[in-house]
Amino acid sequence: MATKTGQCLCGAVKLTANNVPSTFNICYCDMCKRWAGGRWMGIYIANQDLELTGKDAVTALATSDWAERAFCNKCGSSLWYKVTDGPYSDGYSIGVGLLNDTSDLTLDTEYYTDRKTHAYDFPDGRKQMTEAEVLAFFVPAEEGEPE
């Protein structure tokens, strides 16, 4: 198991996670879709293995009788889903997108697959763009530079 670092979009909340597994999960429930703006991709981190800085920028909301979801109150980044009661309350489901390095992670389980929509089925033949292509497409060239 690895140690990984990460942060929210604005950097107000930073994390170090120890004993990080190599697998993550996806949830398609309606609450996760609304909260994350799409499917939630989370990786389990035990309570004792998560170190946070910027806790004053964290807002946690009880979203059911048994769970909470947290976000950065500065930039809005979804941070974690946490079961707050019962046998699974010993850890966090940290957003995979917060992590600086996800190159070694693989998908393990999908939850609420009966709620999964076709929006998550990516068709063959779709246009795909690299980072360089996206930057060339969206970022204006400096004046005087050739396009």
Image (tube, grey):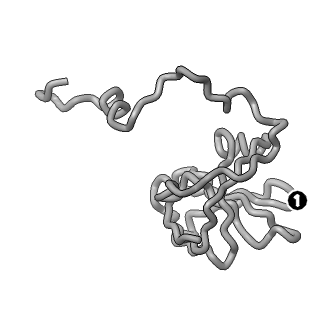
Reply above or below: 117 against 50. Answer: above
Residue at position x 64%, y 40% from top? 37
Callout 1: helix, strand or loop? loop
Residue most extreme to the left: 144
Reply above or below: 145 against 125. Answer: below
Q: Write down the residue under mark 1.
A: 65
Of residue 63 and residue 2, the one placed in the foreground of this image is: 2
The 10 Å Cα crowd at callout 1, few under 14, some 14 to 19, many 20 or more, is few
Residue most extreme to the bottom: 48
Name the amino acid type tagged 1. Asp
Q: Quadrant of the C terminus?
A: top left
Position in image of residue 132 (x %, y %): 32, 36
Residue at position x 37%, y 38% from top? 131
Position in image of residue 30 (x %, y %): 79, 40
Position in image of residue 71 (x %, y %): 62, 56
Q: Is residue 62 left or right of residue 21?
A: right
Reply above or below: 112 against 3. Answer: above
Residue at position x 60%, y 68% from top? 20
Of residue 124 and residue 80, the one placed in the foreground of this image is: 124
Residue at position x 15%, y 28% from top? 143
Q: Quadrant of residue 118?
A: top right
